[in-house]
Each structure stands twice: as structure tokens, then as C-alpha cells.
Image: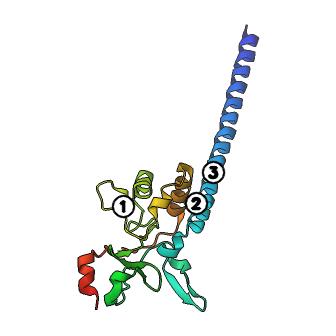
Amino acid sequence: MKKQLIIVTTILLMAACNSREEKSVTSTTEEALLTETSSELIRRGEYLVTIGACHDCHSPKVMTEMGPEPDASRLLSGHPHNEPVPDIPDDSKEWVLFSMDLTTFVGPWGVSYAANLTPDDTGIGNWSYEQFETAIRKGKSKGLETNRDLLPPMPWQMYRNFTDEDLRAIFAYLKSLKPVNNLVPQPIPPHKLEAMAR
């Protein structure tokens, strides 16, 4: 009887050890898979942001011999808060104007500025994915249903056609960026724009 009890106990202990070993292997494998998936998601998001031309407006520029190029130290950080709006010509109502670094825009809507898309608190640092989705799908500032509409030239009407997977990848990529502290100015409405025009 003692011998049988020892054998049964030994079998149970071996089964428990194997079970823990399997769990450990499974857990490690799942973690690696999640990390790999996150990494793939971020790479996909970077690709979509690049081909979606997000840097054209949201990244401050440095001037080169070939014209403006995105400033690698401030990628996707929006219009620099300390850069004043250039003089706006009298006939601006007849044009849509872009600043030299392509982060400030003038048109019938007034003056708009490219937003900070980095994960700093002055950007999208405290945004949920749902807010990001609302901003892109519904064109709402800061992704809040009660906020104003996004202003031109933000082409949210085109970007709202991204798949859910695309939007999640873009959001993952933006959240992976280096945070840049840059509080972008508020837009200037058309009536104030008239007073600024010389």
C-alpha cells in the first residue's frame, strides 16, 4: 500500500511539474508573440503614416538645398508653438496658403495648425484609441464628439476609410514615438484673420 502511495504521489508530482513547465513555455511563447505582434503593428503603422503623407503637415521642417525636409528630432510634433504666423497678404481670401515649413495653413476657415501627434501630454499622450478613432472617422478635434470639426487641410474624409486594423497600427506607431513637448496654438477664426491681413 505504501509503495502504491509513493508511486501515485510521484506520478502526480511529475504531472504537476510538467504542467508548470508547459505553462511557463506557453506563457513565454505568448509574451514573445505579443511583443512580435506589437512590433509588427508598429512597423505597419509607420508604413501607413509614411505613405499617408502625415509628415508633410505634422512634422516641422528643416530647409535643405532641395527644399523643406522633415526635422528628424521633431517628427510628427505639429506646428512649433514658438513660431509666429508669417504675414498674411490682403488677397489671402483668394488662396489657400501654407507656411514655409508646411505646418500652418490659411484659407476661408481662418488659420489652422498641424497637431502634435506624439505621445506627449501636449499631443496624444492621454488619448484613448477610441478618441483617435473618433478624430479620424468623424473629424472631431481631440477625438471628442462635442468638439469642433477638424479644419482643413486635414483630409480626415479620406483617412476615415482606413480599416480598423490600419487605424490600430497607426495609433500603435504614434504611441511608440519619442514624446515632444509642443503645445500647438489654437486655430484663428476667419474674422480674426481679416484683422491680421495687411
Q: Which residue is mark 3?
A: 37
Q: Residue furthest front?
A: 94
Q: Secondary structure at mark 3?
A: helix
Answer few, some or many: residues within 10 Å of disc 3's Cα (few below 14, many 20 plus, some between 14 and 19): few
Q: Secondary structure at mark 2?
A: helix
From the image, which quarter does the N terminus lie in?
top right
Residue 25 lies left or right of residue 183; in this view the side is: right
Q: Is residue 186 above or below residue 4?
A: below
Q: In this view of the protein, which residue sits in the foreground, 187 or 83?
A: 187
Q: Residue furthest top?
A: 1
Residue 143 position within the rendered picture, expressed as x and y whole percent measured from the top left: 37, 57
Q: Which residue is mark 1?
A: 142
Q: CA distance from mark 1 to mark 3?
A: 27 Å
What residue type is disc 3 on?
Thr
N-terminal of the two: label 1 or label 3? 3
Q: CA distance from mark 1 to mark 2?
A: 20 Å
Q: Which residue is mark 2?
A: 45
Answer few, some or many: residues within 10 Å of disc 1's Cα (few below 14, many 20 plus, some between 14 and 19): many
Q: Nearer the viewer, mark 1 or mark 3?
A: 1
Q: What residue is drawn where x is 38% and y is 75%?
A: 113
Q: In this view of the protein, which residue sits in the foreground, 137 or 64?
A: 137
Q: In this view of the protein, which residue sits in the foreground, 135 or 5?
A: 135
Residue 2 position within the rendered picture, expressed as x and y whole percent measured from the top left: 72, 11
N-terminal of the two: label 1 or label 2? 2
